Each structure stands twice: as C-alpha cells, then as structure tokens.
Amino acid sequence: MEKKNAVWITGASSGIGRALTIKFAKNGIFVLGTARRNDLLDEIKNELGEFSTFFMCHQLDISDFSLVSEFHKKISTEYQIECLINNAGINSFKNAVDNSIQEIEEILQVNLLGSIYAIKTVLPEMIERKSGTIINILSVVTQKIFTASSAYSASKSGLHAYSKVLREEIRDKNIRVINVS
C-alpha cells in the first residue's frame, strides 16, 4: 500500500498552528494536526467544511515521548510525513524569580523536548528516503531579550541551537531544517 503524503503540525488547535492547518487543508495538502485540546481540533474540522477531508486530528501531549512515539507508529503505516511543523508551545509570562520549578519544567518539556521528540520520530524515515522538511516555529526571543519570558526564551533558544546543529548533521540527506522566528 502506498502511503499518503502529509504535513504534521503540532499545536494545531490555536494561533499559528491553527492558521497553518486551515491554509494547508484549503490548498489540498493533507494535515495531521495534533494538540492537547481535542475540542479545538474538532472546531477546525467543522470550520474546514468540504476541505475537512484534508485534515485528520489527534489529541496528543507532545511532552510525553511514549505518546509521541505511539502516535507516529500508528500514523506511519498509512502516512508519510513530508513536513513536520513544530508549533506546540506554552509560556507563563512571569519573571524568572516568580516561575515555579514545575512551570519551568513544563515549558521546557513542551517547547524544547516535545519538538525534539517529534523530530526524533520522523527523522529516520526522512533520512531513509533522503527528503523532508522540518520547520520549527520559534520566536523573536531567540534574537532579543524580553522580560517575563526566561523559561520560554531558554526553550526556544535551545530548539534554535538544536536545529542549527541538526541541519549541519543531515545536510547531505536532502532534508531541510527551517527555523521561523
């Protein structure tokens, strides 16, 4: 059975992820949209109307590697991820002194490790077929200092650095790694 090409968008339920999901689907590109809030994913499916056939939604907590791996195993039998868009992200908008350790860990787990987990699941297949695109939705915090965003800045800057190294490591594999701030 030939697999269908797909774009996987994490954090597809709101903001940039929602806008990208709608744009891709309305242009006939199949989207696998994941997010923690299934109700918001269902709203997108309803909003897409006749284009809903280009969208499949899955509730997924990107911060849990076992769930990400399980999701990828499930969908990879039918879909080939041509493009991964790492968009899932959270922030607390607090000064560093006011962030709890739990908040910091959650931000790093979702924004940095969750993105790396998604990359780790799709990368072997992209390397094998020598094609693919990984897009990381970062933030201007990787370039400029914003107060009340220390943990968020650390998570996005960490993903920025990880991606730059990854890009060099797989340069000869015809896989694009793109960071959008």
Image (cartoon, rainbow, N blue to C red):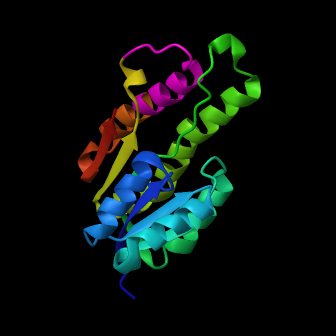
Residue at the image point whose x is 51% and y is 46% from the top: 88
The foreground one among 41 and 127 is 41
Name the side, left or right, on which 109 lies relative to 168. right
Is residue 157 positioned above or below 17 on the image? above
Q: How far from the left and from the top, in percent, is residue 62? A: 60, 51
Q: Residue furthest bottom?
A: 1
- Type of secondary structure dominating the magenta stretch: helix
Residue 64: in sight, yes or no? yes
Q: How far from the left and from the top, in percent, is residue 27? A: 25, 68
Residue at the image point whose x is 53% and y is 23% from the top: 154
Q: Quadrant of the N terminus?
A: bottom left
Residue segment shown in magenta: 144-160
Is residue 105 positioned above or below 65 on the image? above
Q: Quadrant of the C terminus?
A: top left
Q: How far from the left and from the top, in percent, is residue 50? A: 35, 80
Residue at the image point whose x is 38% and y is 15% from the top: 144
Is residue 83 positioned above or below 94 on the image? below
The foreground one among 165 and 82 is 82
Q: How far from the left and from the top, in percent, is residue 32? A: 45, 66
Q: Is residue 164 magenta?
A: no
The foreground one among 72 and 97 is 97
Residue 54: in sight, yes or no? no
Q: Is residue 158 magenta?
A: yes
Q: How many marks?
A: 0
